[in-house]
């Protein structure tokens, strides 16, 4: 046991001495919370609108006023014809344009159909669609309130956003960020620290020492676990303090599931280190094999349902996908194990298989 | 000049001989492009939808058919049970629950209005708003259709109150919509130009940071330092091959994007490559700056990873700059990646010319001068 203690002390010193790596490990999660909270958003607001109004009149002015009155739009240019419009869109000065047909107000006054063209910059399709539906709803409202009695039929949608009523992305990223931080620390760092011993040849020395194999693993891994848990707690506290992110379910369950996820990531890290011989290869493998999938295929940033079928199937073997689903369930929906048992069982299965494989690969090396 | 070329040749040989580096340069970018462009998408289609139809009339069925036919929604199940719908929402099986109340059709016929409840699982954030606006547009269009269909019946049955022709004299606005630059709303066309920037950045920064850190770790940097090479010559020789490689990768990625995803290339490719050449100087210089501050390859990779992570997330590559909070938008001005993403999208998707991309291009030139000067100054031929 004192041997294990010695190894733990050695590893802790290694971590504390490499200031740059430690700084990155501690600073990255903190900065990411700020970035995700303030920058990774998709809400559409303050839209730059260009107006092409060949024959300004009370009616066109009123419609324009209605648009700017909604506080979603800001008129950046009023043009007499559509000639300069393209340039405004190309430089990004305008995101949407309202093009009135000549004689718009006259037609409207005579009860003829008045023609209006709504142009949106659909380079980013979702923003394009959102802006377009904002403009259309204002125009329809305007039309309905016009003189003459409203006719026709209207289906009134009553929308409700469940689990995240303000649809704020800040509530969504924390579970993903936890998975991300835990993957960096438990998988990437484990793989690197084990391969480093291999590369420098000190692994042999460790193996002939009285340390048992599991001592080596525990001694190597435990200090990083402490760093990992500290980071995760930091992320949750910071997210709650700055962004008031909800934590509706049981904290104990969240930590239990977190430990399960850590076990899976650790086993992956040990496996990677067993298959590689240099730190560079181990790092590349860990980055490509675990970090990127955690970022991209876990549903952390991009919804998995929107991906092509093949990627959806692949995403099923990414442990982070299941952990993100669990953590969101606990934090946002406040549900317990009764709704999350499928995901939990999958993680348990992954943990058993990977830990078994990791233990075997480590034994093989001994012989 | 001959010295630079010699050292540059040595660098090229290093890259070509090392299988890992070669894979990093040739295979990884293409794989990344193919996977990322498919995965990094906020496109909304096949939203799993649970329909609670308490009305069971032709009007309610029509509405469900319109939703299903739009391609944005996939109807999981329809029943009259609210609690089953709630379960589907909690389990995560359904993202949208559409509830059509009991007197939907009769209320439409009688008063011309009827509510429909849309409950979205907003757990997935941005998607929720888009799902709602698609659903809203479908409801609006269906209202229009129903209006034409129900109006005669309204008149003959006598639901109209007095005025025999409620439509005459009512001003109508005929609205047409155009989504410029991406009429098919193909997310991949938006992502490819951005991912290309990410590729060029990764190659440039990572390789240059790693390269010099490796020489440091192996001790061969000392040997180079005692040669008569000047700092400037040394850096030029180190960066030249990587610079060419970066441009080569851009071409490769562009070709793959064209062949696989048929992305538009509306503007001048020459202009894009000129901008990339300037931008690569910035990316390489940042890598060089990182390598002067670290001792080992591991640290170099770690710090690069950290810096790029922040840069890419703040570049407007994945989420629009316009949606960021105002102070974040200011901060992102300091991010060279942001400017090149803007240029790349403007040229490829919008067909912008030199005039339109001049401001961000000038900013990039400024960045290139500053970062290169800093990198050359920070790099010392020290002995310690």
Image: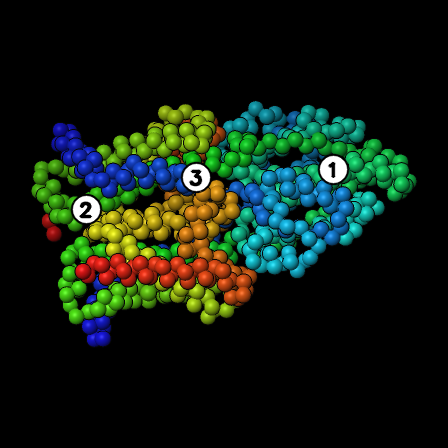
Within-10-Å neighbours for mark 2: few <14, some 14–19, many 20+: some
**Gap between marks 2 and 1 measured at Cα:** 68 Å
Which quadrant holds the N terminus of chain A? bottom left
Where residue B347 appears, as percent x and y from the top left, is 43, 29
Which numbered circle lies on residue B37?
3
Residue visible at 62% across and 26% down in the picture: A80
Where residue B22 appears, as percent x and y from the top left, is 25, 38
Element at badge 1?
helix
Q: Mark 2 points at which residue?
A: B214
Which tag is nearer the camera, tag 2 or tag 3?
A: 3
Q: Do the residues labelled 3 and 1 touch (CB within 8 Å)?
A: no
- As rendered, which of A282 and B10 lies closer to the eye? A282
Q: Is residue A301 left or right of residue A222?
A: right
Mark earlier in primary sequence (3, 1): 3
Element at badge 2?
helix
- As rendered, which of B324 and B201 lies closer to the eye? B201
> Is disc 2 in the same subunit as disc 1?
yes
Q: Total number of numbered labels?
A: 3
> Is disc 3 in the same subunit as disc 1?
yes
Image: A334 above or below B339: below
Which quadrant holds the C terminus of chain A? bottom left
Mark earlier in primary sequence (2, 1): 1
**Gap between marks 2 and 3 measured at Cα:** 32 Å
Which tag is nearer the camera, tag 2 or tag 1?
A: 1
Residue visible at 71% across and 25% down in the picture: A103
Q: Mark 1 lies on which chain?
A: B
Q: Mark 3 lies on which chain?
A: B
Residue visible at 22% across and 71% down in the picture: A4
């Amino acid at each position: 046991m004192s041997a294990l203690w010695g190894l733990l002390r050695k590893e802790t010193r290694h971590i504390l001495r490499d200031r740059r790596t430690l700084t990155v490990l501690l600073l990255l999660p903190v900065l990411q919370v700020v970035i995700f909270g303030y920058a990774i958003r998709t809400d559409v607001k303050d839209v730059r609108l260009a107006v092409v109004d060949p024959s300004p009149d009370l009616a066109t002015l009123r419609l324009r006023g209605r648009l700017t009155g909604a506080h979603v739009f800001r008129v950046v240019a009023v043009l007499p014809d559509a000639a300069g419009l393209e340039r405004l869109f190309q430089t990004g000065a305008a995101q949407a344009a309202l093009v009135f047909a000549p004689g718009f107000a006259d037609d409207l006054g005579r009860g003829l159909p008045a023609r209006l063209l709504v142009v949106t910059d659909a380079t980013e399709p979702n923003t394009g669609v959102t802006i377009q539906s904002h403009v259309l709803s204002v125009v329809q409202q305007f039309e309905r309130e016009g003189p003459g009695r409203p006719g026709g039929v209207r289906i009134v949608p009553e929308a409700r956003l469940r689990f995240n009523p303000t649809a704020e992305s800040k509530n969504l990223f924390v579970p993903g960020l936890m998975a991300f931080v835990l993957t960096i620390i438990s998988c990437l760092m484990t793989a690197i620290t084990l391969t480093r011993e291999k590369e420098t040849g000190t692994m042999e020395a460790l193996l002939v020492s009285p340390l048992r194999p599991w001592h080596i693993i525990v001694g190597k891994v435990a200090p990083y676990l402490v760093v990992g848990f500290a980071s995760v707690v930091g992320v949750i506290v910071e997210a709650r303090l700055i962004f008031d992110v909800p934590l509706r379910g049981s904290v104990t369950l969240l930590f239990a599931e977190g430990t399960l996820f850590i076990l899976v990531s650790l086993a992956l890290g040990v496996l990677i280190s067993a298959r590689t011989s240099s730190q560079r290869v181990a790092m590349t493998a860990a980055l490509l094999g675990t970090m990127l999938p955690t970022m991209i295929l876990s549903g952390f940033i991009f919804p998995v349902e929107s991906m092509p079928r093949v990627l959806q199937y692949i995403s099923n073997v990414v442990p982070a996908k299941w952990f993100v689903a669990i953590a969101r369930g606990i934090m946002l929906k406040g549900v317990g194990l009764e709704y999350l048992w499928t995901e939990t069982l999958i993680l348990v299965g992954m943990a058993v298989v990977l830990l078994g494989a990791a233990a075997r690969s480590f034994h093989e090396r001994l012989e | 000049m001959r010295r630079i070329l010699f050292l540059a040749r040595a660098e090229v040989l290093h890259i070509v001989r090392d299988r890992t580096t070669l894979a990093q340069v040739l295979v990884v970018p293409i794989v990344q492009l193919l996977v990322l462009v498919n995965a990094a998408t906020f496109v909304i289609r096949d939203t799993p939808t649970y329909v609670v139809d308490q009305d069971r009339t032709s009007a309610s069925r029509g509405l469900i058919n319109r939703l299903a036919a739009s391609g944005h929604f996939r109807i999981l199940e329809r029943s009259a049970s609210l609690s089953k719908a709630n379960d589907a929402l909690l389990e995560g099986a359904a993202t949208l629950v559409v509830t059509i109340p009991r007197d939907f059709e009769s209320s439409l016929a009688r008063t011309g209005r009827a509510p429909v409840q849309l409950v979205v699982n907003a757990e997935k954030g941005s998607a929720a708003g888009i799902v709602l606006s698609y659903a809203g547009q479908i409801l609006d269009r269906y209202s229009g259709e129903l209006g034409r269909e129900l109006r005669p019946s309204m008149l003959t049955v006598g639901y109209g109150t007095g005025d025999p022709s409620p439509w005459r004299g009512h001003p109508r606005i005929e609205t047409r919509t155009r989504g410029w630059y991406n009429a098919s709303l193909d997310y991949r066309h938006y992502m490819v130009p951005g991912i290309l920037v990410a590729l060029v950045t990764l190659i440039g920064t990572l390789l240059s940071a790693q390269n010099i850190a490796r020489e440091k770790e192996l001790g061969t940097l000392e040997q180079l330092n005692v040669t008569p090479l000047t700092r400037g010559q040394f850096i030029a020789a180190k960066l030249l091959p990587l610079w060419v490689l970066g441009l080569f990768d851009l071409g490769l990625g562009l070709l793959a994007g064209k062949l696989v995803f048929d992305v538009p290339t509306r503007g001048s490719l020459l202009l894009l490559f000129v901008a990339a050449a300037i931008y690569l100087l910035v990316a390489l210089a940042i890598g060089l700056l990182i390598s002067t501050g670290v001792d080992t390859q591991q640290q170099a990779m770690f710090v690069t990873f950290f810096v790029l992570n922040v840069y890419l997330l703040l570049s407007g590559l994945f989420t629009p700059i316009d949606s960021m909070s105002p102070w974040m938008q200011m901060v992102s001005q300091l991010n060279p990646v942001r400017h090149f993403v803007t240029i790349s999208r403007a040229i490829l998707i919008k067909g912008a010319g030199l005039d339109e991309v001049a401001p961000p291009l000038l900013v990039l030139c400024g960045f290139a001068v500053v970062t290169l000067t800093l990198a050359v100054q920070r790099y010392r031929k020290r002995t310690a």
